[in-house]
Amino acid sequence: MASSHGPKRLDARGDQGAAMLEFIALSLVLLVPLIYLVVTLSRVQAGAFAAESAASEAARTVVVTGVRELENGGRRSAAMDQGERRARAAVRLVASDFGFGSDDASLVLACGGTCLAPGSNVAAEVTVRVTLPGIPGFLSGGVPLAVEVVGTARAPVDSLTEDS
């Protein structure tokens, strides 16, 4: 009597293990790029956080250091020089906190109006160079080896003094 369930397979062992092999191959093809993407994006995000934090810290450092120097009778140019030195040190410290070297972060300072004058602003722009992980140097012609992330901040110089 013939079975109504369809033809019988004669060799059921021919497909054994194929699903496992396909799963492993597909996992590698999909997971490796996904993991690389997560690692790369987290590194770029760390660079963005470092740039913003360093810019904010640099602008505040210039204002606080510069105003203190002016209150102690220093010249405006000397106060700005002192503030800039401390701001560069602050940028290096913040960059190292986020895992970047001191050469990876650069600082540009600008003043809105007369530097350190009451009511003016000090602007800081920090650029952090983020090296992309896992890209060999010989691909530098076709693939970028690093990206630059920029953070900016402004710190106001208080217009209130002891004289007013």
Image (cartoon, rainbow, N blue to C red):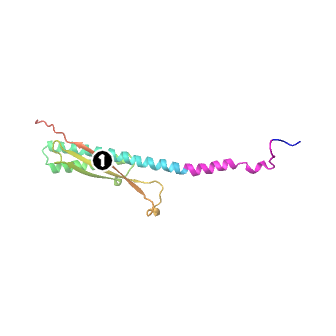
Q: Quadrant of residue 6?
A: top right
Locate the C terminus by quadrant.
Answer: top left
At a point 79% along the width and 50% down the height, the residue shown is 11
Q: Is 24 part of what is drawn in magenta?
A: yes
Position of residue 56 relative to residue 148, above or below, is above
Q: Main secondary structure of the magenta part?
A: helix
Residue 123's spot in the image, x, y percent? 25, 47
Residue 160's spot in the image, x, y percent? 15, 37
At a point 12% along the width and 44% down the height, the residue shown is 73
Locate the N terminus by quadrant.
Answer: top right
Residue 109's spot in the image, x, y percent? 24, 51
Task: Inspect the image, locate mark 1, and give the three-letter code of the amino acid beneath it.
Answer: Thr
Relative to 80, is 163 on the left or the right? left
At a point 35% along the width and 48% down the height, the residue shown is 95
Q: Quadrant of residue 129?
A: bottom left
Relative to 56, is 98 on the left or the right? right
Q: Is 132 part of what is drawn in magenta?
A: no
Which residue in the rendered view is the most extreme toward the left?
163
Residue 142's spot in the image, x, y percent? 45, 62
Q: In this view of the protein, which residue sits in the foreground, 68 or 133?
A: 133
What stretch of residues is rendered in magenta? 5-31
Which residue in the rendered view is the most extreme toward the front?
4
Relative to 95, is 155 on the left or the right? left
Task: Name the residue that disc number 1 marks.
Answer: 152
